[in-house]
Image (tube, rainbow, N blue to C red):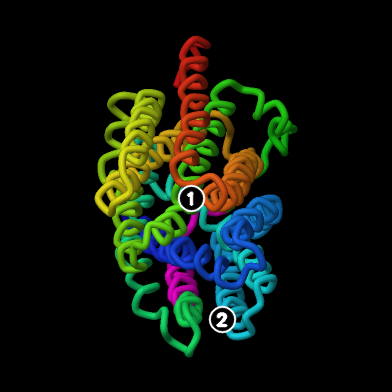
Amino acid sequence: MNKNLWLLTLAQGLFLTNNVTFIAINGLVGLSLAPFGWMATLPVMGYVVGGALSTGLVAHSQKLWGRQRSFQIGLIVAFVSALMGVAAILMQSFYLLVLTTVVAGYYSANGQLYRFAAAELAPSTGKEKAVSWVMAGGLIGAIVGPNLATVTKSWLGQPFAGAYLSLSVMAIISFAIISRIEFPPLPEVVGENQQGRELSIIMRQPIFVVAALGASLGYGVMSLLMSATPLAMQACSLSFEDTAFVLQWHVIGMFAPGFFTGHLIQRFGALAIMGAGVVINLVCIVIALNGLDVTHFVWALFLLGVGWNFLFTASTTLSLKAYTPIEKDRAQGAINFCVFTTMGFTAFASGAFVTTQGWHWLNWGSFVPVLITGAGLIWLKLQKTPT
């Protein structure tokens, strides 16, 4: 760890504060404003769809202006979208709320690249640990996000309008932090192959396929269950304070392992840690299927977070072997597009499923992507590709 990595860790924490606050309130605000109940998680889906639509723009801006300027543009968008959220609630406009989250998705597409930037701020022998430690900064979001939503939910006279306003302040603070980080200069273009390989060639590599599969389906399962949790807990007559508590432990599960995941990856390899993530996700689903009290929600969501951390961190480090520095913007953009596309589908499906079929069947459906991820790991192992 060095000064730049510590600052990036703090920026990651504020990024996750934004995400956790969005998760805690978007479904509930959507439910209160939506014309139909099944549309409740459209604002959650809007955030993900906005991220998916922005991956190409973000990749282009990273290539054109570098990490710092691109991240700063993302934070300006975060500030504007937070104020749009305030306006949407004060005007009681569901469609403005959805537009708000779509615009905010640009910030999400930027923030998803913090983990890749971490690898560039560390020596070559410490990339796994750098990625893992920066992702551990999400613990800030675990502590601040749920409490921020709880404390500010009654500000401005409308439920949760103050929470969106507080996120505009988070964006300003994060902008100042990013401005202090010294990112490496853009890679010099030398030789005849100035663009690197075609993206289609990069994406056909087995190692890239499994890295993208692990990241996207790992995030997809997490999004599927996490987005539905506030609605499921409300249906069980549990309080918002209980929901905030459950989400807090979920995010702790997501990022606390970051203090040692990098070491585990260095010792056992990325595939082994991804396999552990698959097993933990299976345990999470089994717990969720066995009860509807706060304890079951806490343990299921905590393990869901740990499983996501193992899958996502190991997938990120695995993907670093699939492309060269000159190819990184396109390759990372492609991975994030897969992640956002999967998250967009699962965020919408979670709301539609939990309001029509219930929490029980939603969890049974989650077995499918988890098992597909496990099959992908076995396939890559049989390819005998160095990982």
Give me the residue at 59% from left, 50% from top: 352
Q: Mark 2 sits on what residue?
A: 86
Dividing the picture into quadrants, the one containing residue 132 is top left
Q: Is residue 221 left or right of residue 4?
A: right
The percent coordinates of residue 368 (x first, y second) are 52, 29
Give me the residue at 44% from left, 41% from top: 360
Q: Is residue 6 left or right of residue 203?
A: left
Q: Mark 1 sits on what residue?
A: 117
Range of residues picked out in magenta = 169-185
* Marks 2, 1: nearer the viewer: 2
Depth order, front residue of 272/205: 272
First along the sequence among labels 2 and 1: 2
| Three-letter amino acid code at the position of disc 2 | Val
The percent coordinates of residue 324 (x first, y second) are 58, 34
Residue 112 sits inside the magenta stretch: no
Q: Can residue 283 be seen in this view?
A: yes
